Image (tube, coloured by chain):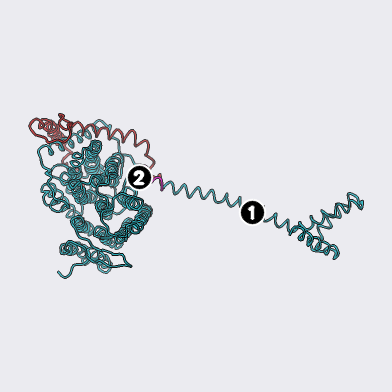
Chain colours: A cyan, B red
Amino acid sequence: MSEPVAPFLVFFLGAALVPLLKGKGRKGLLLLVPVLGFLNLVHLGEGLHWSLDYFGYTLVLVRVDRLSLIFGYIFHLIAFLGFLYSLHVDDLLELGAAMAYAGCALGVVFAGDLLSLFVFWELLSVASAFIIWARRTRASLAAGFRYLLVHVAGGLMLMAGIVLQVSETGSGEFGFIGLQGPASLLIFLGMGVNCAWPGIHAWLTDAYPEASVTGTVFLSAFTTKAAVYALARGFPGTPALIWIGAAMTAFPIFYAVIENDLRRVLSYSLINQVGFMVCGIGIGTPLALNGAVSHAFNDILFKALLFMSMGAVLHRTGRINATDLGGLYRTMPLTCIFCMVGAASISAFPFFSGFVSKSMVMEAAALGDMRVIWFILLFASAGVFHHAGIKIPYFAFFSHDSGLRPKEAPLHMLLAMGVTAGLCVFIGSAPGFLYSLLPYPVDYVPYTQGHVLSQSQLLFYSSLAFTLLILSGIYPAEIRAANLDADWFYRKGAKALYRGLGRLLPRLEALELKLMVNGAAAGLSRLSQDGPARLALLFLFPLWKLKGVKREDLAHAAAEVRRAMATGALPVGLGAAMAILFLYLLFLFG
Amino acid sequence: MGDRAQEERQYLFDKPRNVKRLFGLYYPWLGALLLAELVVHRHSLFPWEEWPGFYAAFGFVACVALVLAAKYILRPLVMRKEDYYE
């Protein structure tokens, strides 16, 4: 292979070529780009590459170290699997956007300075918005716009923080930042938006389920994990992250229990899993950081696998609500099995991938004697099995018979799911391979008898709870409904603002009409018309009274003066007298 | 022809016997997991991890609490009609 190039460049070139090729050529390109990118990455040595001076600021386009490298590997891997899954797609917009999106995510994780980070960060948001729009439904269009607005707001915070940070420290290097002062806080929050922190998470559960069957697979992999990488780089050991992460693991599972759209259930569980990573980054010990990074690696695989299996169901049946599905194991047995492998992996069953990574974060919390955090994480571990591990496969493939008898998923989808499922089992059963890629040396042993037993008890007795609740009819029936979440504030808030302004502005206009147009302006015009006459009458009335003019003639004379003034038909003498009077007044007050 | 074969075909869990078999494996397995505590040595960091059946009880109680809270607290608060945002 010739000279290596920047990892993002391979995908950007690929994105440019997507519209130029057709049929098999394009399919080949989709699969070839991640493979070539991976070979390129392997040839890229550790260290800084492509440093450019830009008005005294050093741009570092590519920084390769163990932390960025493992994210680089998994991003290439999931891009390959995602495109394998998408081989039936002919939509140039979606394929091109997905290719560029993967490139942007690589740009983020290899960016060595804050400005490059920001540029790729923004491009990432734009590319992903196009993936959402590519489904071309009214809902996806609207959700994509909301998604973009939230991310643009987050990007602005990031940019403001970066500008402040660079001017304060004089360095644009993207290394450890740490939470100190407003600059770092803005960067922290900007990253938090992409990481789907509680309260600023709703873009994810709003938009991901609206993307296409294939688009959601890409979306689930890149944005949040690139943000996890950025936090691991800039804010390891920040105590606030421990609590933010713990909250992320816990609150989405309640929503997931009552949610009907199964891809939205998975979106909630995505936040829940990212919570474990954020929590690990907050704890900040080598064990915890290894846990966070390895869990990101595993989550990309098993979450993609779950989204693939639900995507296959949506692809074959056109439905994704639990209320419309059920009993599909009959005709989609392989998809069902792959889904269950994903479910077992996310639930951290022994011999599945989640088991060897999530437990590192739990162990790190216990070693740090964080009791409350440990309990929250344990609760979330049981909860994730409940809603993602059981609910997803149960309502789609078992439960009541929906009567649907769809065909098994297409071959390329089955292949993508099969390989991903195989990787989940491989990593879970032989974690040494994943551990050898982690940023810190690993001396953690996941497979002890005690750990296997504890985890099995936790999960199987969680399943017992599910079984008994279902059999007793207490388990909440799935209902076609919209569940309010934090996006309510801007979805309803924006409408209320719009309506409020719609009501307020006409009133303001009416008031303005009354006060300014009819009031002040009319008054002014009356004054300029009437003023001289009134002024003249002010002097004339006493004069007429003195002369003894009769009352009825007085009114007549006043009307005469007014008319004469208004039409400018004053007798010359009177006009001159008025002018002199006016000059006199000017002299008096001037 | 094909359709009819499809309709008449009995799948794995269409037979009550198979469902029964599944539960016949499931419940004893749950018991075995509890009994295994007697022979397996656990390395624990917190004292409560040593309590007999701690993980099993926690998993069960946590999930029941989760479902009840979601059904009786969260759902009444947040559930709206499907076209709420339209």
Sequence-earlier tag: 1 or 2: 2
Q: Is residue A444 left or right of residue A319?
A: left
Tell me the kind of residue under disc 1: Met
Mark 1, Cα crowd under 10 Å, few <14 / some 14-19 / many 20+, is few
Residue A410: in magenta span: no
The x, y position of residue A359, in whole percent, is 17, 42
Q: State the SS at label 1.
A: helix
Could you say which quadrant of the image residue A49 lies in?
bottom left
- Would residue A463 be visible to someone looking at this image? yes
Residue drawn at 16 percent across, 44 percent down = A355
Tell me the kind of residue under disc 2: Gly
Residue occupied by mark 1: A516
Residue A199 badge: 2
Mark 2, Cα crowd under 10 Å, few <14 / some 14-19 / many 20+, is few
User: What is the total number of numbered labels drawn onto the structure image?
Assistant: 2
- Given the current orientation, which residue lies at the most extreme top position? B52
Disc 1 vs disc 2: Cβ atoms closer than 8 Å? Answer: no
Gap in angstroms between the C-alphas marked 1 and 2:
45 Å
Question: Viewer-proximal residue, A232 or A570?
Answer: A232
The x, y position of residue A40, in whole percent, is 17, 64
- Would residue B2 be visible to someone looking at this image? no
User: Magenta stretch?
Assistant: A481-490
Q: Where A445 sits versus A23, above or below?
A: above
Residue A407 badge: none
Q: What chain is tagged by disc 1?
A: A
Q: What chain is tagged by disc 2?
A: A
Q: Is residue A536 left or right of residue B3?
A: right
Which quadrant is the N terminus of chain A positioned in? bottom left
Q: Is residue A432 left or right of residue A107?
A: left
Could you say which quadrant of the image residue B28 lies in?
top left
Could you say which quadrant of the image residue B43 lies in?
top left
The x, y position of residue A210, in whole percent, is 32, 51
